[in-house]
Amino acid sequence: MPFDAISPPSLMFIVRCLGISPIPLAEFQAYKDSQLREHPGNPWYHHRFLAEAIISVFFLVCGIGVVIGSIASVIWLGTFAGVICVLVAFGSAIMLAFLIMSGVLVGTLTLTGPAVWIENDVVWSEVPAEIATLGRRVLDQIPDALPVVGKLVQDTCVLDPYLIIRRGGEEVCLGIWDDLGVIYSGARNNPPAIMRDNTSCKA
Protein backbone atom coordinates (compact mmCIF):
# COMPACT_ATOMS: atom_id res chain seq x y z
CA MET A 1 0.00 0.00 0.00
CA PRO A 2 1.17 3.60 -0.48
CA PHE A 3 3.32 5.23 2.17
CA ASP A 4 0.83 7.60 3.75
CA ALA A 5 1.93 7.73 7.39
CA ILE A 6 1.61 10.92 9.39
CA SER A 7 5.39 11.38 9.23
CA PRO A 8 6.18 9.99 5.80
CA PRO A 9 9.56 8.34 5.31
CA SER A 10 12.12 9.98 3.10
CA LEU A 11 11.98 9.56 -0.64
CA MET A 12 15.32 7.74 -0.64
CA PHE A 13 14.06 5.32 2.04
CA ILE A 14 10.97 4.45 -0.01
CA VAL A 15 13.01 3.95 -3.16
CA ARG A 16 15.44 1.68 -1.32
CA CYS A 17 12.54 -0.31 0.16
CA LEU A 18 11.33 -0.93 -3.40
CA GLY A 19 14.67 -2.53 -4.20
CA ILE A 20 15.77 0.34 -6.43
CA SER A 21 19.36 1.61 -6.41
CA PRO A 22 19.28 5.28 -7.43
CA ILE A 23 22.38 7.07 -8.58
CA PRO A 24 24.21 8.63 -5.60
CA LEU A 25 23.48 12.36 -5.75
CA ALA A 26 27.15 13.35 -5.52
CA GLU A 27 28.03 11.07 -8.43
CA PHE A 28 25.04 12.28 -10.41
CA GLN A 29 25.99 15.94 -9.94
CA ALA A 30 29.61 15.18 -10.85
CA TYR A 31 28.38 13.49 -14.01
CA LYS A 32 26.25 16.50 -15.00
CA ASP A 33 29.14 18.90 -14.37
CA SER A 34 31.54 16.77 -16.41
CA GLN A 35 29.15 16.75 -19.37
CA LEU A 36 28.93 20.54 -19.32
CA ARG A 37 32.73 20.78 -19.35
CA GLU A 38 32.93 18.38 -22.28
CA HIS A 39 30.49 20.44 -24.38
CA PRO A 40 31.56 24.10 -23.97
CA GLY A 41 30.75 25.22 -27.52
CA ASN A 42 33.25 26.05 -30.25
CA PRO A 43 35.52 29.15 -30.29
CA TRP A 44 33.55 30.80 -33.11
CA TYR A 45 30.50 30.95 -30.85
CA HIS A 46 32.35 32.52 -27.92
CA HIS A 47 34.11 35.15 -30.08
CA ARG A 48 31.43 35.76 -32.69
CA PHE A 49 30.66 39.35 -31.59
CA LEU A 50 34.35 40.30 -31.56
CA ALA A 51 34.86 38.88 -35.06
CA GLU A 52 31.81 40.75 -36.36
CA ALA A 53 32.98 44.01 -34.74
CA ILE A 54 36.50 43.75 -36.20
CA ILE A 55 35.19 43.00 -39.67
CA SER A 56 32.71 45.90 -39.44
CA VAL A 57 35.43 48.39 -38.42
CA PHE A 58 37.81 47.31 -41.17
CA PHE A 59 34.93 47.35 -43.65
CA LEU A 60 34.21 50.98 -42.74
CA VAL A 61 37.88 52.01 -42.90
CA CYS A 62 38.42 50.35 -46.27
CA GLY A 63 35.24 51.87 -47.67
CA ILE A 64 36.43 55.31 -46.64
CA GLY A 65 39.85 54.56 -48.16
CA VAL A 66 38.29 53.67 -51.51
CA VAL A 67 36.18 56.84 -51.62
CA ILE A 68 38.89 59.26 -50.48
CA GLY A 69 41.58 57.58 -52.59
CA SER A 70 39.42 57.74 -55.70
CA ILE A 71 38.53 61.41 -55.22
CA ALA A 72 42.11 62.42 -54.39
CA SER A 73 43.52 60.56 -57.38
CA VAL A 74 41.26 62.59 -59.66
CA ILE A 75 42.26 65.88 -57.98
CA TRP A 76 45.99 65.11 -58.22
CA LEU A 77 45.82 63.29 -61.53
CA GLY A 78 49.24 63.00 -63.20
CA THR A 79 51.19 63.72 -60.02
CA PHE A 80 53.11 61.48 -57.65
CA ALA A 81 50.45 62.13 -54.99
CA GLY A 82 47.82 61.01 -57.48
CA VAL A 83 49.66 57.71 -58.02
CA ILE A 84 49.77 57.16 -54.26
CA CYS A 85 46.05 57.86 -54.03
CA VAL A 86 45.33 55.35 -56.80
CA LEU A 87 47.35 52.73 -54.94
CA VAL A 88 45.49 53.54 -51.71
CA ALA A 89 42.12 53.25 -53.45
CA PHE A 90 43.15 50.01 -55.19
CA GLY A 91 44.49 48.48 -51.97
CA SER A 92 41.39 49.50 -50.07
CA ALA A 93 39.18 47.95 -52.74
CA ILE A 94 41.07 44.65 -52.52
CA MET A 95 40.84 44.67 -48.73
CA LEU A 96 37.15 45.53 -48.96
CA ALA A 97 36.53 42.54 -51.21
CA PHE A 98 38.45 40.32 -48.79
CA LEU A 99 36.40 41.56 -45.85
CA ILE A 100 33.16 40.94 -47.72
CA MET A 101 34.26 37.37 -48.35
CA SER A 102 35.29 37.03 -44.69
CA GLY A 103 31.87 38.24 -43.60
CA VAL A 104 30.23 35.68 -45.86
CA LEU A 105 32.51 32.99 -44.41
CA VAL A 106 31.70 33.94 -40.83
CA GLY A 107 28.03 33.85 -41.69
CA THR A 108 28.32 30.26 -42.91
CA LEU A 109 30.27 28.95 -39.92
CA THR A 110 28.56 26.56 -37.54
CA LEU A 111 28.26 28.39 -34.23
CA THR A 112 27.82 25.70 -31.60
CA GLY A 113 26.92 27.16 -28.23
CA PRO A 114 27.63 25.57 -24.84
CA ALA A 115 25.42 22.72 -23.71
CA VAL A 116 22.82 23.27 -20.98
CA TRP A 117 20.76 20.93 -18.85
CA ILE A 118 17.01 21.44 -19.18
CA GLU A 119 14.14 19.61 -17.48
CA ASN A 120 10.66 18.82 -18.81
CA ASP A 121 7.58 16.83 -17.94
CA VAL A 122 7.89 13.12 -18.55
CA VAL A 123 6.73 11.56 -21.81
CA TRP A 124 6.77 7.92 -20.74
CA SER A 125 6.92 6.60 -24.29
CA GLU A 126 10.33 8.28 -24.67
CA VAL A 127 11.75 6.68 -21.52
CA PRO A 128 13.35 3.21 -21.80
CA ALA A 129 10.97 0.58 -20.44
CA GLU A 130 13.42 -0.52 -17.76
CA ILE A 131 13.66 2.99 -16.30
CA ALA A 132 10.00 3.89 -16.88
CA THR A 133 8.96 0.84 -14.85
CA LEU A 134 11.02 2.11 -11.91
CA GLY A 135 9.41 5.53 -12.14
CA ARG A 136 5.89 4.11 -12.15
CA ARG A 137 6.67 1.88 -9.18
CA VAL A 138 7.82 4.86 -7.16
CA LEU A 139 4.79 6.94 -8.18
CA ASP A 140 2.45 4.12 -7.17
CA GLN A 141 3.82 4.45 -3.64
CA ILE A 142 4.17 8.25 -3.63
CA PRO A 143 1.34 9.71 -5.76
CA ASP A 144 2.32 13.30 -4.95
CA ALA A 145 5.88 12.87 -6.23
CA LEU A 146 6.86 14.61 -9.47
CA PRO A 147 8.60 12.73 -12.30
CA VAL A 148 10.94 14.87 -14.41
CA VAL A 149 13.10 14.16 -17.44
CA GLY A 150 16.33 16.14 -17.80
CA LYS A 151 18.29 16.48 -21.03
CA LEU A 152 21.66 17.88 -22.01
CA VAL A 153 20.90 20.12 -24.98
CA GLN A 154 23.47 21.66 -27.31
CA ASP A 155 21.77 23.55 -30.13
CA THR A 156 19.59 20.85 -31.79
CA CYS A 157 21.48 17.94 -30.23
CA VAL A 158 20.11 16.12 -27.18
CA LEU A 159 22.39 14.03 -24.97
CA ASP A 160 21.95 11.68 -22.02
CA PRO A 161 18.36 12.14 -20.82
CA TYR A 162 17.73 11.13 -17.22
CA LEU A 163 14.66 10.42 -15.09
CA ILE A 164 14.40 11.86 -11.61
CA ILE A 165 11.61 11.73 -9.05
CA ARG A 166 11.09 14.77 -6.80
CA ARG A 167 9.12 15.28 -3.64
CA GLY A 168 9.54 18.43 -1.60
CA GLY A 169 13.24 19.14 -1.40
CA GLU A 170 14.25 15.55 -2.17
CA GLU A 171 15.07 13.96 -5.48
CA VAL A 172 16.42 10.65 -6.74
CA CYS A 173 17.74 9.78 -10.18
CA LEU A 174 16.48 6.42 -11.41
CA GLY A 175 18.36 6.18 -14.68
CA ILE A 176 20.24 7.73 -17.57
CA TRP A 177 20.13 6.68 -21.21
CA ASP A 178 21.12 7.72 -24.71
CA ASP A 179 20.53 6.61 -28.29
CA LEU A 180 22.62 3.49 -27.72
CA GLY A 181 20.63 2.33 -24.71
CA VAL A 182 20.60 2.55 -20.92
CA ILE A 183 23.73 4.04 -19.34
CA TYR A 184 22.58 3.65 -15.74
CA SER A 185 19.51 2.01 -14.27
CA GLY A 186 18.41 1.77 -10.67
CA ALA A 187 17.04 -1.68 -11.44
CA ARG A 188 20.54 -3.13 -11.59
CA ASN A 189 22.34 -4.14 -8.44
CA ASN A 190 25.76 -3.30 -9.85
CA PRO A 191 25.18 -0.62 -12.48
CA PRO A 192 28.08 0.42 -14.71
CA ALA A 193 29.95 3.66 -14.07
CA ILE A 194 28.00 6.55 -15.57
CA MET A 195 31.06 8.59 -16.54
CA ARG A 196 30.83 7.98 -20.25
CA ASP A 197 32.86 9.96 -22.80
CA ASN A 198 30.02 11.20 -24.98
CA THR A 199 31.44 12.80 -28.15
CA SER A 200 28.41 12.61 -30.45
CA CYS A 201 27.71 16.34 -30.27
CA LYS A 202 31.07 17.83 -29.37
CA ALA A 203 31.98 21.08 -31.11
Image (spheres, helix red, strand yellow):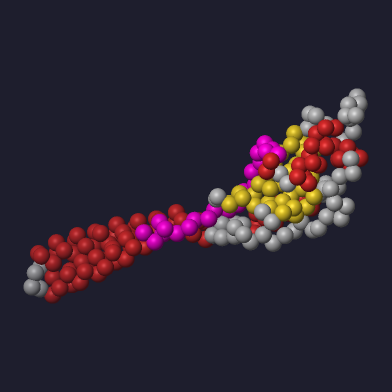
Question: Is 4 placed left or right of 52 in the picture?
Answer: right
Residue 176 position within the rendered picture, expressed as x and y whole percent measured from the top left: 74, 50
Q: Is residue 83 visible?
A: yes
* Residue at the image point whose x is 76% and y is 50% from the top: 28
Magenta segment: 104-124
Q: In the rendered view, would you say 75 is above or below 9? A: below
The quadrant holding residue 71 is bottom left
Residue 101 percent coordinates (x, y): 34, 63
Q: Quadrant of the N terminus?
A: top right
* Nearer-the-camera pick, 64 or 99: 99
Residue 68 image position (x, y, % from top left): 19, 61
In this picture, is 187 found above or below 13?
below
Residue visible at 82% across and 48% down in the picture = 186
Magenta span contains residue 184 = no
Measuring 91% from the left and 40% from the top, which residue is drawn there? 17
Based on the picture, tell me whether residue 118 belongs to the magenta stretch: yes
In the image, 180 versus 121, the foreground residue is: 180
Image position of 57 with respect to 148: above or below = below
Q: Residue 151: where, in percent of width, then height?
A: 66, 47
Residue 110 is left or right of residue 183, and the answer is left
